[in-house]
Image: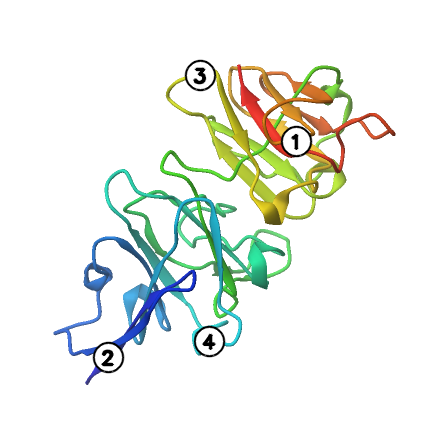
Amino acid sequence: MRYRAIVATLMGLVLAVAFVAPAAAAYSNCNVGYVCGWYDTNGGGTRVELYGNGGTCVSFAGQPWDNQFDSFRNNMTTNGRHVQFYDNSNCTGQLLWRDSVWGDGGPFAVGVQDNFEWSTPRGGAAVHHRNRASSAFFNTGFAGPDDVTAPRLNLMSSALVGYNCANASWVCLFSGQNGTGTRYVLVEPASQPLCQGLPGFFNDKAHSAQNNTSDVVTVFEHGNCTGVGQNIPAHSFGNLNLCAFCVAGKVSALKWQ
């Protein structure tokens, strides 16, 4: 049987198509320097190889692989970018989970390979994330989309509702209140302080946040970590302050203290 591999160099560059006949379907067929998606589970069927610069969203709209992936592998270089998959174009909508870790929508580090989630959770609705990927976000080398935090807030006043931010090195921003809507993950950098600007698709979108790290972070209304800000204490979650001079719906950057 012949398996088709589609190598997509995106962001306005050349699109190349190649045909290969591997001895057997396998995650190892993903070439170094790419993120691969397969039409079947366990690295089987048609393979699509994706590339994106750090901090960019790659949409699949109009491409034959839109809503086709059942499995994936991040095979960027060792210091390469983490990746997240979304069910809508422009990196919006539902974050797609990996199958082997319940609730894990990334960012997926270099070396992560898995099927997308397809299961019926305990007492809940079925979670079917295969054949739904419509875009992918390529994070910066250390791992996550960018957010901002600043002074003034009582994050712990909120009841835990939809906050899905399980990793101890993550700060998560959510487009809706109470940890709902689109999630944007920032991974704690090795060196601080550091100001990180948010990508365009999540600029002025955050309404709630969760800080799982041991450090205070601050979100700001301007991309260079200036203007109105709000602190997010360590190990806290809650809605961002909403008023004419507050940051909710205005966050453009996040500063690690």
Q: CA gap, disc 4 to disc 3? A: 40 Å
Amino acid at the residue labelled 1 = Ala
* Label 1, residues with CA under 10 Å away: few <14, some 14-19, many ≥20: many
Task: Identify which residue is drawn at 59% across, 39% down.
Answer: 164
Instruction: Mark 1 or mark 4: name the one nearer the start of the chain.
Output: 4
Left or right, residue 27 beside residue 254:
left
Front residue of this view, candidates 223 and 211: 223
Under mark 4, the amino acid is: Gln
Residue count near mark 4 (Cα–Cα under 10 Å), binned few <14, some 14–19, many ≥20: few
The earlier-in-sequence mark between 4 and 3 is 4
Residue receiving disc 2: 3
Q: CA distance from mark 2 to mark 4?
A: 18 Å
Q: Mark 4 near mark 3, Cβ–Cβ under 8 Å? A: no
Q: Position of residue 186 (x, y in %)?
A: 51, 33
CA gap, disc 3 and disc 2: 46 Å
Residue 191 position within the rendered picture, expressed as x and y whole percent measured from the top left = 39, 18
Give the residue type that dot 2 points to. Answer: Tyr
Residue 235 found in image quarter: top right
| Residue at numbered disc 1 | 209
Residue 63, numbered circle: 4
For marks 1 and 4, give the CA distance: 34 Å
| Discs 1/4, front | 4
Q: Which of 123 and 173 lies nearest the eye of the viewer?
A: 173
Residue 209 drawn above or below residue 128: above
Q: Earlier in the sequence, mark 2 or mark 4?
A: 2
Q: Which residue is mark 3?
A: 192
Question: Within 10 Å of the Cα at label 3, are there few (<14), some (14-19), or many (20+) other Cα atoms?
Answer: few
